Image (cartoon, coloured by chain):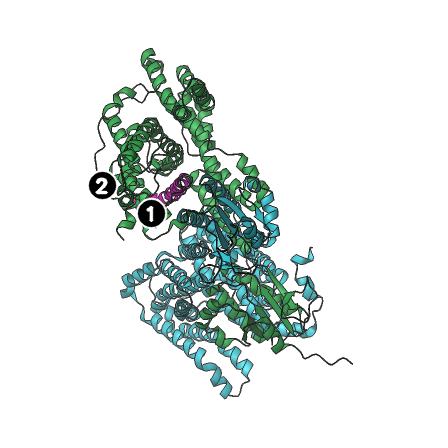
Chain colours: A cyan, B green
Amino acid sequence: MFKRYLPILEWMKIYDRQMFSSDAIAAVIVTIMLIPQSLAYALLAGLPAEVGLYASILPLIAYTIFGTSRTLAVGPVAVVSLMTAAAIGNIAVQGTEQYLTAAIALAFISGAMLILMGIFKLGLFANFLSHPVISGFITASGLIIAASQLKHILGIEASGHNLLDILLALCNHITQTNLATVVIGIGAIAFLFWARKNLKNLLLRGGLNARLSDLIAKAGPVFVVIITTLITWGGNLQNQGVKVIGVIPQGLPSLALPPFDPDLWQQLFVSALLISVVGFVESVSVAQTLAAKRRQRISPDQELIGLGTSNLASSFSGGFPVTGGFSRSVVNFDAGAETPAAGAFTAIGIAIATLLLTPLIFFLPKATLAATIIVAVLSLVDIAALKRTWTYSRSDFSAMLVTIIVTLVQGVELGIIAGVGLSIFLHLHRTSKPHSALVGQVPGTEHFRNIDRHEVKTDKHILTLRIDESLYFANARYLEDRVYELVALTPTVKHLILMCPAVNLIDASALESLEAINARLKDSGVIFHLSEVKGPVMDKLKRSHFLDDLTGQVFLSQYTAWEALRTPEKAPL
Amino acid sequence: MFKRYLPILEWMKIYDRQMFSSDAIAAVIVTIMLIPQSLAYALLAGLPAEVGLYASILPLIAYTIFGTSRTLAVGPVAVVSLMTAAAIGNIAVQGTEQYLTAAIALAFISGAMLILMGIFKLGLFANFLSHPVISGFITASGLIIAASQLKHILGIEASGHNLLDILLALCNHITQTNLATVVIGIGAIAFLFWARKNLKNLLLRGGLNARLSDLIAKAGPVFVVIITTLITWGGNLQNQGVKVIGVIPQGLPSLALPPFDPDLWQQLFVSALLISVVGFVESVSVAQTLAAKRRQRISPDQELIGLGTSNLASSFSGGFPVTGGFSRSVVNFDAGAETPAAGAFTAIGIAIATLLLTPLIFFLPKATLAATIIVAVLSLVDIAALKRTWTYSRSDFSAMLVTIIVTLVQGVELGIIAGVGLSIFLHLHRTSKPHSALVGQVPGTEHFRNIDRHEVKTDKHILTLRIDESLYFANARYLEDRVYELVALTPTVKHLILMCPAVNLIDASALESLEAINARLKDSGVIFHLSEVKGPVMDKLKRSHFLDDLTGQVFLSQYTAWEALRTPEKAPL
């Protein structure tokens, strides 16, 4: 039972030298890629750059111990960083001590929630996020993130948590644009787009093998970081107004308990829940994609614990919320990582970088980091998904569109809440009118079919309504309406039979409705029967008073009911 | 089409003298009963007593025109009045002009929402309120209302919107209890309980006929009102500290537009939605009960319009939110009302009372009104329902219990939100793991059955998973997990067939999952097939790219799939 929560015990048993070397090579590559990413996403979250590095050390080690994916690379990611900024932005001012404290608390609450969900096997919370909502949310987040980084490209001040605010702020400050910054920013963006499209082919033609070419091409951001840092340093561009990362405290993060502040926790509760669920959904989908390629398995419930401990570890070491990232996990996989140990080695790599390399990135322009973010998130924007979903299903499309619009206009939290709310509403709407049919006897058989579609025998004193869905609160009222309508429209009816071959569940609301139907039909002189009730449903009904009060009977088969109740046929004259 | 929205046109055609006299008699009785009720519920809502009368004139006329129940009696009711107090209590102080303005605005917003729901046929919003939630909510509200009225019985000051606050406030002021008030209050309560139990039998024994005895017994509150008013007047008890209704402005309400104040509307939005839905659910269930007794029908969508116009009418005439009330509708029905015209006649009765009788109730003690409220709402409290629900279904029980506890501790709005949220969550939880089975061929037949339950033929290269539920966002991820688990545990598998005879719907999330399954199985060298896909589902799949990408085929029957894919049997050695 202890082992269940420690997947590391399983793969450590078979760990060997060959795995070690594969993992180590992958770790080196991921480390190089993760350094600029972690700095960039910390800035996106409104935090000092070094916090991104802190969030890329202990969380990775925690995931190595508790995670079930062999190749998932954990750390700061774009969407979660944006959600962090939105969550804390309401509570504290960027750059203050309170802001950092709130970020640390957010990682703690989010980690605790994930662990609780994992222990109580509540991964199904993720089921609330339908695919159109997630897809719409990520598209809208990508647009907001890209817009929010434009200020760094232009070298101006502008902030906001939704697209309108950000664009307005940009317009207000556009005159303060700094030319040198723009040159670096646009140059970096152009290079990154070019590299993504052409660098791999160039390297292939240059004689490198396919895998190496691919990895180098994916490391495009690293080249940009090095080149623009050198240019800025050489040209003394920070004196021209180019904003650089500047001094980063050298050394490992110090361990500390997150602040115990119930008021703060309460303020962050909903945000932490949203971040947990969104982060989990994203991470699990990456992990599943990679696991399937090697016929491995991940355990979603244990993933909750893996990500939860990662967030706790982030919180204890002064970091902010983390989760599994798509691009770096793919790089980790492609670079040959075989076990989660690669994550631990990456953590060591980042720790060394934190100790030694920070002076070197003093001259790294913020515009460069913004450029890497913009290019990364624009690949998340999937406008074509809107069209695909429109073609497939109008109701899924509307959930997606509402998510995108509310996210863009009102911000990430309301966006995801609106999307989830709407898709649950639409689902209940869809099941609130279950398929049902009046049925009659197929002459000469024991079969009963829809009277609108088949030539069947009916009886003016008997109505048989077959219901093709479980009965629960969302459709209980519809059933009542349907029965009352039928009875009101058929003055000759004496018996109403509810035929239940497809009813797998009758919840307490539906039971009340059946009791109400029974009582009201009694008042209007109609006897109420059931037929073909499944065993488990019948067992449950026996625990209520319904069967005692039922005016009619429960028939095992519809045919028995029909034979017992129908008007004897007159002999032909 | 115009006619659809005006049910009055239908019954007016057949209106005759006999109906008129039945309706008129019922109206007199309901008027007598409604006067103390409307005063009492206005006080419960924290409003001046006359506002209750205003809310019992025009709203009734609106319902006569737009309502579909022949016997529903509309006006202020207990639970909606409590919700009104809770909604406005956060915004304004009782007794101020702002408080009244907010109540009027609340009726307006609630009316507008109901009408919109009616036009867009969104009565299904009411489906979100499962029966255990409604039942728990009403029980808890009844307890809160009863507790909130104790201050009037004791003659002290105490207020709050949840049980704890109210009880604490009562304790703090208990020493200021007014003896004369207590005598009147307890006396009134005792009489009302006695009357409910014994008055009818006494009258029957006294020689009155059954129907009249019943009606008189139900008019118990009227006697109490008259008697305690006379006692207070005769004994000059208001000088002993007994609080009385006092001066009520004589005359009809003046018509006015509700305040146009977007800020106020926004603050009241959620409250108005909750009041609309709760009021609608309560009203429709009363209307349906009564309609069924006479084999009449009501139209839930038109009821939304009927109740919506009633609330607009209330708002335009200085009233507060109204809905159909249980006890007065039953009295209306028993007294012989035949058409909604009885409601209009009741409105005339209340209008006359407002013009003429208000000076007579100057000496009506507030303790008397509190007593009528307490006795009325305690009949709503149904603790036994908790036990019944526990026996029937643990998950419905938990929804009910949470609703009761949160309502009592946190107030009505959070209570109902928590209950609805939990019941939707539990429902999604229940359907998130659909029933599924690995199936094999029943030897010598074309039938396929669960391999765990039947002796069936299988093939080590083929897995057939039959899924017994529609595929949508809540169970899409489970399907993925299940498939990956199967494939990971069965290294020999080459074909995976998803058998879909019970799948009525595949939403966009489930489509994504099928696409992911297809792609991931492809990566691990397994071919993915479907069998027995229903026509409408297939039509929808054709609108996506899924069928183009599918590595395997779609088979019309599972038997065809089996025959096409299975390993040819070796001839016996």
Circles 2 and 1, Cβ within 8 Å, touching? The answer is no
| Quarter of the rendering occupied by the C terminus of chain B | bottom right
Residue B38 figure quarter: top left
Magenta span: predominant SS is helix
Is residue A69 shown to the viewer in this render?
A: no
Residue B526 lies, in percent from the top left, at 60, 75
Residue A280 lies, in percent from the top left, at 53, 60
Is A213 left, or right, of B206 in this rendering?
right
Q: Residues within 10 Å of mark 2 (few under 14, many from 20)?
A: few
Residue B49 lies, in percent from the top left, at 31, 28
How far is the residue under mark 2 from the one under mark 1?
Answer: 24 Å
Give the chain letter at badge 1. Answer: B
Magenta stretch: residue B268 in it? yes
Is B547 left, or right, of A58 in this rendering?
left
- Which of discs 2 and 1 lies nearer the camera? The answer is 1
User: According to the image, label 1 marks what residue?
Assistant: B302
User: According to the image, label 2 marks what residue?
Assistant: B257
Residue B462 lies, in percent from the top left, at 64, 73
- Of the residues shown, which amino acid type is indicated by label 2? Leu
